Image (cartoon, helix red, strand yellow):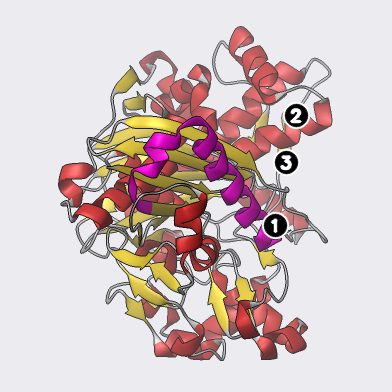
Amino acid sequence: MTFLGIDIGTSGVKALLIDAAGKALGEASAPAVEPVRPHPGWSEQNPTDWWTATLGAIDKLKASHPKELAAVRGIGLSGHMHGATLLGENDAVLRPCILWNDGRSAAECGEMEAALPTLRQLAGNIAMPGFTAPKIAWVRKHEPDIYRQIRKVLLPKAYVRLLLTGEHVEDMSDAAGTLWLDVAKRDWSDELLGVTGLTRDHMPSLVEGSAVSAQLKDEYVSRWGMSGPVVVAGGAGDNAAAACGIGAIRPGEGFVSLGTSGVLFVSNEKFSPNTEGAVHAFCHAIPDTWHQMGVILSATDSLNWLSRITGKKQAELSGEAEAQFKGPGEAIFLPYLSGERTPHNNAGARGSFTGLSQSTDTAQLAQAVMEGVTFAMRDCQRVLADAGTSINRLLAVGGGSKSALWLKMLATNLDMEIALPEDGDFGGALGAARLGLCAATGANPADVMSMPPIKTTIAPDKTLSGAYSDQYARYRALYPAIEEARS
């Protein structure tokens, strides 16, 4: 008996096979067509691109691990959150999906909160352009013909589930990021839906992440040579899935993710909103569990941007920074290239460098970018602490965690040890596979969501703590000063 985790990202899909003991048996990936930005601040992607990449990744597993794939009994799904996938009659896609990092609906956020003064209390979150509901409000205002045709609104992984199973279903963790869920009650809110003119009929049904959501269609059971009925778990949004993959499901357990976006995640035993600090308070993928997140929109994407304008690869830039690193640099970078969520909730915020000189080179620019992202994560820790939340254990995931220097910066600025797990790139896919295991076998998630083997632990560099605190203070002073100058 084996289990399959599918992690749906904007750049591609990863598929991971595990056995009943949770051991990885094989993995495959397939790229997706990159998102497009038709206008500044917009970000869209064709939903069929996720489906094509999903089929491609699993077909590769069929070629490389046919016996293991044949034994699959449960599938779990993980996916990028908040994307507005609009379906009309017969589940036809009405327009490209408006993605999580799209900032066009800032005005609609204010209009929604004015229309429903209790919105923050019900949703447990501020209305942010990244969330799904404001995107629909934007479509209603600017694309009324599309809006009138809407029959269902699905998140990205729910769209893939629909094609795999024929069912409209979503899990609690992903649904919490729509701004339509009463997060405390773990149910759709008629009041929140009403603000965007929708009803429960427009929503998928809800299940817990470790529960059965549907069965895989016979045509795919046959296509991939599977030998019996295959259930599909509720799954999880990408961050909750990563938490399941690295065992962060108990109160105080968390992770820091250096992916395209950046996340500081901590599990909670109860619903704990902190809207003043723009903290995300969501359902976890595990029943009767919640989590908080501080989210920044451009983590490794900031280094991607620097890579594009310098012509140097990310690994080359981070390597140059590490080779010349002696402590905080003169240059300071604000990583708000796509606006920002935590703690500013400002889709119009923009990135900037300060402290440049004639001697500034690409290594120093790369260091400033890495430090700017680190300071943004320190901002997230600060507002979590303001809410009374403490993190007892922190693991690192995401592509940026391959940089030893970046992890050292984070450990020093967050003033806590950071553990680096083995196979960290597959946190989301592993978490999804574990949820598939729970759904298929009825196993207790607490027995399945264990910490993976740890490759190394990074301790804070106490000799740099004071210098970084001073630099962080300068970093914090820049945002309000620059925003005032821009206004």
Considering the numbered disc 1 on the image, is that residue within a helix, a strand or a loop? helix
Residue nearest the observer in this picture, 300 or 225 = 225
At a point 34% along the width and 33% down the height, the residue shown is 395
Residue 143 marker: none
Q: Earlier in the sequence, mark 3 or mark 1?
A: 3
Q: Quadrant of the C terminus?
A: bottom right
Question: Residue 208 falls in which quadrant of the image?
Answer: bottom left
Which residue position holds label 2? 307
Tell me if residue 394 is in the magenta stretch.
Answer: no
Q: State the CA–CA distance, disc 3 to disc 1.
A: 14 Å
Marks 1/2 in contact by CB < 8 Å: the verdict is no
Residue 484 marker: 1
Q: Residues within 10 Å of mark 2 (few under 14, many from 20)?
A: some
Q: Amino acid at mark 1?
A: Glu
Q: Quadrant of the N terminus?
A: top left
Q: State the CA–CA distance, disc 3 to disc 2.
A: 16 Å
Q: State the CA–CA distance, disc 1 to disc 2.
A: 29 Å
Question: Residue 13 falls in which quadrant of the image?
Answer: top right
Marks 3/1 in contact by CB < 8 Å: the verdict is no
Q: Nearer the viewer, mark 1 or mark 2?
A: 2
Q: Residue 481: image x %, image y %? A: 66, 50
Q: Residues within 10 Å of mark 1 (few under 14, many from 20)?
A: few
Q: Residues within 10 Å of mark 3 (few under 14, many from 20)?
A: some
Q: Earlier in the sequence, mark 3 or mark 2?
A: 2
Residue nearest the observer in this picture, 19 or 97 = 19
- Left or right: 43 with respect to 185? right
Q: Which residues are magenta?
A: 46-75
Which residue position holds label 3? 352
Question: Residue 212 falls in which quadrant of the image?
Answer: bottom left
Residue nearest the observer in this picture, 475 or 126 = 126
